[in-house]
Image (cartoon, rainbow, N blue to C red):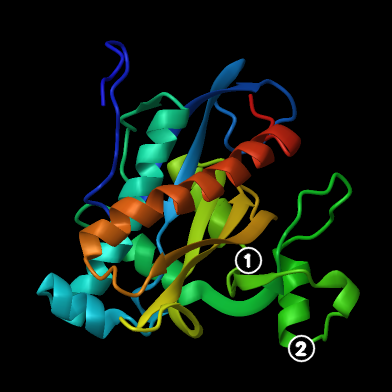
């Protein structure tokens, strides 16, 4: 990919979490603890990959055997491949430059801090509504009270995250000057044996899902959804799966982020 001469691109391929500084205009407005430039500064995003335990797949045996890897290597490859694709899409959509500091390099204490604070639960997909008042505290009450949503309110569900430490994101936002957090919550690969693509060759449809959530710097959730692609069960090369399916997953996530930044913009000084 060709780069613009005045722009350095930070892909973060080798880091589990990356801080990408996006050159998207943010105009002066209300004051906050992050506003240290008086007129204008760039928006930034912090991408948090899913915990290794949140990889759920019934295809790992096939992928490991075909790709000549062990199952742990397959999982690591998919996890890093997803982050690489998502960063690549950010580079394609925005001008991204090397940040002043990386979220994780040789010290992963902040990563563990985040993971130890996470709670997971099923939630209704988070539509963009101008009058939405949903935030993490509201969602936390819903999860732990085990409310049963009505049929009218459920079109699709996804795995969402909440935080035992409600100040965690605002603290990290201050430390890393992040305006939005993109959490990749879970990756699922499920073979649908009822959907046979070729009975003679025993080829079935597989579904790959990535559940994700977007929060702003105050810790308020502004979006959440699941990105879904399908591929056949005879596609077992890990590199091929990454190349063929993760760009579509990343497109879905980035389109959500773009809508969020337009409809629920962060106001900074």
Which quadrant would the C terminus be assigned to in this image?
Answer: top right
Specify whether residue 188 is in view: no
Task: Residue at 26%, 52% (x, y): give it.
Answer: 15
Q: Quadrant of residue 213?
A: bottom right
- In the picture provided, is 225 more to the left or to the right than 90? right
Label annotation for residue 166 = 1
Disc on the earlier residue, 1 or 2:
2
Q: Using the rendered image of the protein, determine whether residue 198 is visible from the camera's viewpoint.
A: yes
Give percent across and percent down for residue 219: 64, 56
* Nearer to me, 264 or 196: 196
Residue 4 in the figure: left or right of residue 106 = right
**Residue found at x 83% / y 49%:** 129
Instruction: Point out the image quarter for the N terminus.
Output: top left
* Residue 67 quadrant: bottom left
* Closest to the observer, 238 or 215: 238
**Element marked by disc 1:** loop
Task: List x then y, in percent, for residue 253.
Answer: 54, 49
Instruction: Name the residue rendered at 21%, 51% in the picture.
Output: 14
Q: Give the alpha-carbon distance from disc 1 to disc 2, as whole Å.
A: 20 Å
The disc placed on residue 146 is 2
Foreground disc of the pair 1, 2: 2
Where residue 142 appears, as percent x and y from the top left, is: 78, 79
Crowding around mark 2 (Cα neighbors within 10 Å: few <14, some 14 to 19, many 20+) is few
Residue 102: horizontal and vertical position, in percent?
31, 44
């Amino acid at each position: 990919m060709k780069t613009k001469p005045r722009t350095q691109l930070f892909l973060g391929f080798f880091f589990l979490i990356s801080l990408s500084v996006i050159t998207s205009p943010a105009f002066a407005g209300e004051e906050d603890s992050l506003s240290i430039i008086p007129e204008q500064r760039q928006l930034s995003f912090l991408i948090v990959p899913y915990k290794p335990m949140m990889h759920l797949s019934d295809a790992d045996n096939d992928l490991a055997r075909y790709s000549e890897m062990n199952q742990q290597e397959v999982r690591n490859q998919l996890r890093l491949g997803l982050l690489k694709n998502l960063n690549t899409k950010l580079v394609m959509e925005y001008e991204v430059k090397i940040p002043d500091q990386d979220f994780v390099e040789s010290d992963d204490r902040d990563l563990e801090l985040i993971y130890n604070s996470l709670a997971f639960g099923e939630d209704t997909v988070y539509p963009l509504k101008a009058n939405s008042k949903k935030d993490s505290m509201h969602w936390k009450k819903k999860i732990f009270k085990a409310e049963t949503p009505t049929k009218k309110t459920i079109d699709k569900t996804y795995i969402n995250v909440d935080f035992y430490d409600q100040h965690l994101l605002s603290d990290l936002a201050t430390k890393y000057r992040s305006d939005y957090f993109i959490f990749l919550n879970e990756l699922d690969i499920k073979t649908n044996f009822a959907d046979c693509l070729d009975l003679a060759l025993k080829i079935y449809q597989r579904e790959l899902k990535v559940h994700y959530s977007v929060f702003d710097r105050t810790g308020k959730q502004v979006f959440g959804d699941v990105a879904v692609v399908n591929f056949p069960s005879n596609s077992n090369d890990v590199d091929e799966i990454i190349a063929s399916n993760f760009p579509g997953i990343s497109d879905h996530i980035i389109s959500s982020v773009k809508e969020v930044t337009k409809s629920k913009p962060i106001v900074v000084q």
